[in-house]
Amino acid sequence: MPDPGSTVSLSVDLPVGSADEAGASASRASTAATKGSRRIGASCQKQERRPLGRDGRRLADAIRASHISENSSRVLADVAGTVLAVGSLACLAAGLLGASGRPARLALASALALAAAWYATDTSVLMRLAVLAASVGLVLVVLERFGRIPGLSVLDGVMGATSAAAVVALLDGSAELALSVGGAVGGMALSRWQPSPAMLLTGAGTIALGAGEPVAIAASPLMALAAWRTEPRVGPGPEFRWTVLAAIIAFATAALTLLAVGQFTMLSDAAAALAVVTVLAGMARAGVTVTNRLRESNVRALTDDLTGLGNRRHLVERLQAAIDRGGAMALLLIDLDGFKELNDTLGHHAGDQVLRQIGPRLGSAVREHDTLARLGGDEFALVLAPGDEVAASTAGLRLRGALEHSFDVEDIVVHIDASVGIALFPDHAPDPIGLLQRADVAMYEAKRMRTGHEVYLPSRDRHSRERLALIGELRAAIDASELMLHYHPKAELATGTVRGVEALVRWQHPRRGLLTPGHFLPLAEQSGLTRALTAFVLDRALSEIGAIRGEPQLGVAVNLGPADLLDLDLPSEVSRAIERHAFRAERLTLEVSEDVIVADPGRTLDVLRRLRSLGVGLALDDFGAGQSSLSHLKNLRLDELKIDRSFVLEMSAGTADLAIVRSTVDLGHRLGLRVVAEGAASTEALSLLANCGCDEVQGDLVAVPMPAGELAAWLARRSAGRPGSVGT
C-alpha cells in the first residue's frame, strides 16, 4: 500500500475504472486528509497540472470537503473554548470582588476553565472534572442561600443525584451527561425544592456541560449570570413539604424500577450501582426520620411549649437523678407576684406574652448545668446540684434581678416581681415530691413576709398550710359577708377634729377568729380576688359611713390595689357605688401606693384621671417607702399625701427621719396637698409633727381601728367634749 503522502499522485494516474475503486480511494484520501491537511493541499495543486477523469474529480471533491469540515470544526472548538474561558474569568471576578459566596463562584470558574481545556485537548477526563466542579458549585450555592442544611435534606440530595444519574446512564450511556443531570437534580433536592434563580442557572449550566458540544458553550453565560447574582440568605422553611415527599417517592420508584428491569435485561454496572445507592439512601432517610420523630416526641414530653423550658416531668426526673447521685442539692420554687391580676385584667394572651419573655430572662441567670423548668401557670423551679443554702439564696437574688426590667405587653409596660421558696436535700425532704412541697411552703412565706426569698423552716410549715387552705374559703367569705370593716380615724393636729377615716378590711373567720389583712390579702392577690374584695370594701364603706348620724361631713378612704388600677372599668364601678348609696363624691378618698403606680404608670394615670373627674379625692399612701418619684406628685393631681409610718415611728429630735418628715411636709404644702402622718404613737411624735406643720395624724394615739358601730359612739363622745382628742 502506498504511503499517505503519495495518495494524490496515484489518484491522478488511475485509469477510468469502477465506482467502487473510486470510493475506496476517496475513503483512503479522507483518512489521509484528517492527518495532514498541508499535504492534501499540495497534492491538489499537482492535480491541476493535467486533466482528471470523472472518478478523479470525485476524489478531489471529497478531499476538499474533508479539509473544509476539519477547519470549521477547529474554528468552532476555538470559539467555544474562548467563550468558556471568558465565562470562567467572569465567575472568577465575581468571586474575587463579591463579599460573600466566594467558594461557589470559584467552583463555577473552575468548571468553565476545565471545559475550555477539554475543547483544546479533547481529553474526556477534563469534561468529567468540569461537570463535577459545576455540581460542587451548585451545592455551594445552595449552602450560601440556606446556610446549614438538615441531614434529611442531604440524604434527599443523595437520592436525587444517584437516581437521576442511574436513569441517564441507562438511557444514554454518557458518563458526563449522567454526572451533570445527577448533580443538578441532587442540588435541587438539597434545596428542598425551593430553587433560587442562581440555583436554576447553575443547574442548567451543569447539564449543558454534561451534554457536550455544541451545547456546552451555553454553560458560560448561565454560570456567569449565576455568579454575579446576589441573593439574601433565607431559612430552610418547613421540614415537611409536599414537593419533598413527591420527589422522594419518585426517586425511590425510579431506582426500584431500574433494579427490577435489570432482572430481565442487561443493565450497566454504573446504573445498577447508582440505583442501589438510591435505595440505601432512602432506607437511611426513613431510619433517620423515625429516630428524629422519637427524639422530638421525647423532647416535647419534657418541654414546656410556651417558654421552651423543661416541664414538671423533666424537673422531677432531674431531681430524682440528682438525689440518686447523692450530695447536697437545692430546689428553688419561683412564683410571679401579681401575675394572676395581669391575666384577669389583660387576658391570658397577655400573660402568655410575659411568660415567653420571662423564660429566656430566667435562663440567662442560671448556670449551664442547672435545671430550670416551668411547673405551670406562673410557677418556675430551679434545681441546683450541687447546691447549699448560700448558693440557693444567691441564685434567688439573680433570678429576681432578671425580672427587674419591665415587660412590654400590648403597648403596656408591666413590672413583674417574684417570690422564691428554697428547700434543701437531704435536710428538708428525701424525695422530689417532698422537696416541691417544702419549697412551696417557703415560697408562700416569702410572699407573706414580702422578703423576696425564704428558706423552708419546719416551724412555719403548719401556719403556711393553714394560709393555703384559706384560698378556697375566701371567695365564700366575701359572698357570706364574713368580711367586715374597721375604721381608723384621722385627726387634725391643730384642732383634734376628725374629718375622715380609713376603711380597713377584717375577716371574721368562723373557726380562726378575727383575721387581719396580712393573713389573707396576699391570698386574694394570688387567687385573683383583689377586684371582688375592693368592690366589697367600697360598697360596705359607703353604706356604713353614710349611715352614721350627725356626721354629714365625715369622709372615708378606701385603698386600691394593682389589679384595681389596671381595670379600665373601675371609674364606672365607683360612680355606680356613689349613686347607689347617695354618697357625695367629695367625701370619698381613694388611696394608692407608689408601688401600685410603678406597675404600669401609663394605664394607672389614665384610670386615676378618670376617677378624679368623678370628684373623689386621691391620696398617695406610704409615701417614701416604695419607689418614690417626684413625678408622681406632679402628674397625679393628688389631694392628700400620707407619710409612711416607718419615718414617723423612728422620728425624734435631730434624726434623719425627722428631716425627711419635715421636708416631705414642706414639699406637700408647696404642691397644695394636705399632709397626713401615719403611725403617730407618742405625744413626742405629735409635738414634732405639729412643729413640722403636718395637717393630720393617724395612729393608735388618736384611736385604734374600730367597727362602724363603735366609731359612731366614739365620734359622739368627741363631739360632746369627752376624752378622745389628739394627744389625750
Image (cartoon, rainbow, N blue to C red):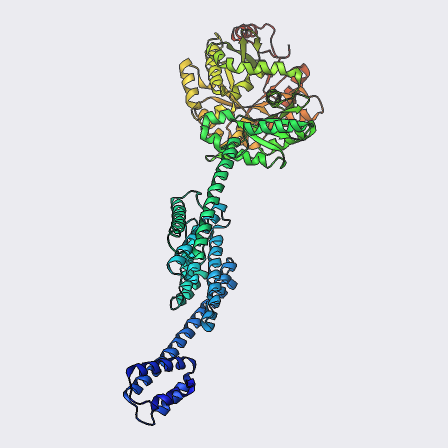
Q: How many marks?
A: 0
Left or right for 629, reference 579: right
Q: Which residue shows up at 37% across the image and 87% down it? A: 8
Q: Nearer the viewer, residue 651 or 461?
A: 461
Q: Nearer the viewer, residue 696 or 629?
A: 629
User: The C terminus is located in which quarter?
Assistant: top right
Q: Residue furthest right?
A: 654
Q: Quadrant of residue 577?
A: top left
Image coords of residue 58 (percent x, y) = 30, 84
Q: Nearer the viewer, residue 58 or 322?
A: 58
User: The N terminus is located in which quarter?
Assistant: bottom left
Q: Quadrant of residue 217?
A: bottom left
Image coords of residue 294 (percent x, y) = 50, 36
Image coords of residue 234 (percent x, y) = 46, 49
Rendered position, 137 above or below 458: below
Rendered position, 401 above or below 641: below
Q: Is residue 222 visible?
A: no
Q: Quadrant of residue 722?
A: top right
Q: Is residue 42 visible?
A: yes
Image coords of residue 256 (percent x, y) = 40, 48
Rendered position, 544 above or below 639: above
Q: Nearer the viewer, residue 638 or 689?
A: 638
